[in-house]
Image (tube, rainbow, N blue to C red):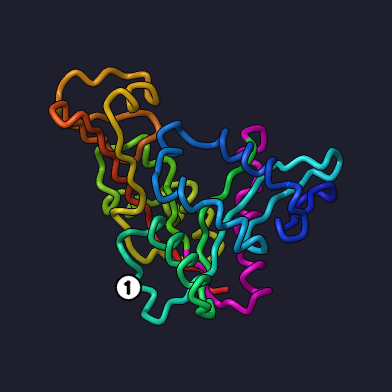
Amino acid sequence: MLDAHYKIVTVAERPDIEEQIHELTSASWPAFMYENEIANENFKYLFLDFPEYQFALLDTRDDKVVAQGNSISFHWDKPIEQLPDEGWEWVLLKGIEDHRAGRAPNMQSAIQICVDRSLKGSGISREMVMAMREIGRKHAIADLVAPVRPNQKANYPLISMADYIKWTTDDGFPFDAWMRVHARLGARIISVCHQAFWVKNTIAAWEKWTGLRFKQSGEYTVAGALNPISVNIEKDLAVYCEPNVWMHHRI
């Protein structure tokens, strides 16, 4: 239950909060996570075409955004179990494509939720997922899916995601805290989306983002990455392919 001074608002209701939303997002991820080509080219359309699906938690005492969520509606006419391996990138493009084609949406997908670092562990993440589901309900959508990024997987980059999602706590919920938030709200795991998010760039760029030096070709673990990155010195290329986990909420 949120304190009385907190309020959920959408960008459709308060377009003036968009700048604060971007500021919070920019402080939430490792540097390399901002270098995905699909996101950089298309993220703006969430605010242009889907403002009612972008929302924030405001502290009304100073009108400050303390958490924010992005989601998108899309059309899907196959079983949920067949959601594609491309995960996050796919659903962002699919929602934009469906909107432009005039296809009526019947699904909602989470894109991200960010919480101010000072409020981590306060239960706000749970409230934000519930707010996202409520937005879907208001638009007569019965299913919310999420290509969940299990953040604690970064502590175990050499473990496959397929194995990691089998880890549980003593009470049977997922070991990963972010997956556990979804699961405690009734979401079920559908599948691993192995190719959800790609970052490809020069070795110099990766050295700048990570503070590491890559002196030979091979696999490297870097802070914040769920999998190792692959470095090819001859091609001057380093590639990160991030797996996420499809989870499904019945709204």
Instruction: Say which quadrant the N terminus sits in.
Output: bottom right
Q: Is residue 199 shown left or right of residue 219?
A: right
Q: Is residue 70 shown left or right of residue 86?
A: right
The spot of residue 115 in percent (x, y) is 62, 42
Instruction: Locate residue 36: give its quadrant.
Output: top left
- Residue at the right extreme, as displayed: 61
109 vs 214: above or below = below
The spot of residue 110 in percent (x, y) is 52, 59
- Taking depth in this image into account, of 11 and 164 the one nearest to the observer is 11
Q: Callout 1, which amino acid?
A: Gln
Residue 195 visible, this angle: yes
Start-end of magenta stretch = 117-145
Q: Residue at (57%, 57%) from the top-left corner?
A: 46
- Taking depth in this image into account, of 145 and 249 the one nearest to the observer is 145
Instruction: Say which quadrant the C terminus sits in.
Output: bottom right
Q: Residue at (32%, 73%) from the top-left corner?
A: 82
Q: Is residue 244 shown left or right of residue 52?
A: left
The residue labelled by disc 1 is: 82
Q: Residue at (21%, 35%) from the top-left corner?
A: 230
Local crowd size for mark 1, using a 10 Å CA cut-off: few (<14), some (14–19), many (≥20): few
The spot of residue 32 in percent (x, y) is 40, 34
Q: Residue at (15%, 22%) from the top-left corner?
A: 216
251 vs 229: above or below = below
What is the tally of numbered marks visible in this picture?
1
Q: Is residue 65 magenta?
A: no
Predominant SS along the magenta part: helix
Q: Is residue 67 shown left or right of residue 154?
A: right
The spot of residue 180 in percent (x, y) is 49, 53
Residue 169 visible, this angle: no
Task: Describe the element under mark 1 as helix, strand or loop.
Answer: helix
